[in-house]
Amino acid sequence: MSSLYGIVAEFTTAEDLLYAAEAAREAGYRKMDAYSPFPVHGISEVLDFDDARLPWLVFIMGAAGCATGFVLQVWTAVFNYPWNIGGKPLFSWPDFIPIAYESTILFAAFTAGLGMLLLNGLPRFYHPIFNTPRFERATSDLFFLCIEVRDAKFDREETAHFLHTHGAHIVSEVEK
């Protein structure tokens, strides 16, 4: 026997989705997620999504890349294989800037790509929301709001009625 994952409401416009999400937030629902074919301005604030881990990871790894590029060149040019060419100093730091800059970009770009995948839990081959009727249209022309069972205020009938009264065209239960 399968268990319930949540109640999903289907909307035809982004404004209806945003209105329903705001109403659900004001009603006390906290464990919910929205699915849409394009970014909806304001939905992340309503859903209280403010994850700042990725920007900090990218910054830290960019700084590490800069330091790595710079230290690698200093080690090579000054300590490991010093060449006195034309009386120039061994530690000529302006020459090291392009490589340090490029290694900053390299480390930051790889961190952004891999961090985005890992922090989003991707690749995800299965999620209960995929069992929602007509959910494949979330990538083309429909908007969905899911209130999950793990929400403290969740009640099967009350939540479904709430979503119906806030503009949902179709409300369905999603099994795990």
Image (cartoon, rainbow, N blue to C red):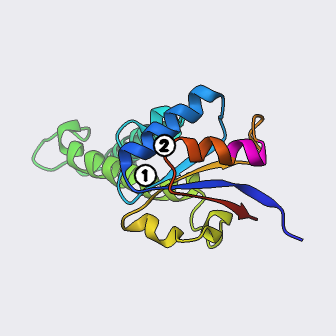
Please state the extent of the stretch shown in magenta in the rendering: 155-159
Query: How many residues crowd around disc 1 within 10 Å: few (fewer than 14), some, or many (20 or more)?
Result: some
The quadrant in which the N terminus is found is: bottom right
Quick one: label 2, few (<14), some, or many (20+) residues within 10 Å?
some
Left or right? Give the position of 42 relative to 5: left
Query: Can I make out residue 51 in this image?
Result: no
The residue located at (63%, 28%) in the rendering is 27
Q: Is 39 located above or below residue 27 in the figure? A: below
Q: Is residue 66 visible?
A: yes
From the viewer's perspective, tell me whether residue 105 is left or right of residue 176.
left
Pointers 1 and 2 in contact (C-beta within 8 Å): yes
At mark 2, the secondary structure is helix
**What amino acid type is highlighted by mark number 1?**
Ala
Q: Kindly indicate the quadrant of the structure image that contains residue 130.
A: bottom right
Dot label at residue 54: 2
Q: Could you tell me what secondary structure mostly forms the magenta stretch?
A: helix
Q: Amino acid at mark 2?
A: Leu
Q: Position of residue 107 (x, y in %)?
A: 40, 52
User: Residue lying furthest right in this view?
Assistant: 1
Which of these two is toward me, 109 or 149? 149
Residue identified by numbered label 1: 112
Q: Position of residue 127 (x, y in %)?
A: 65, 66
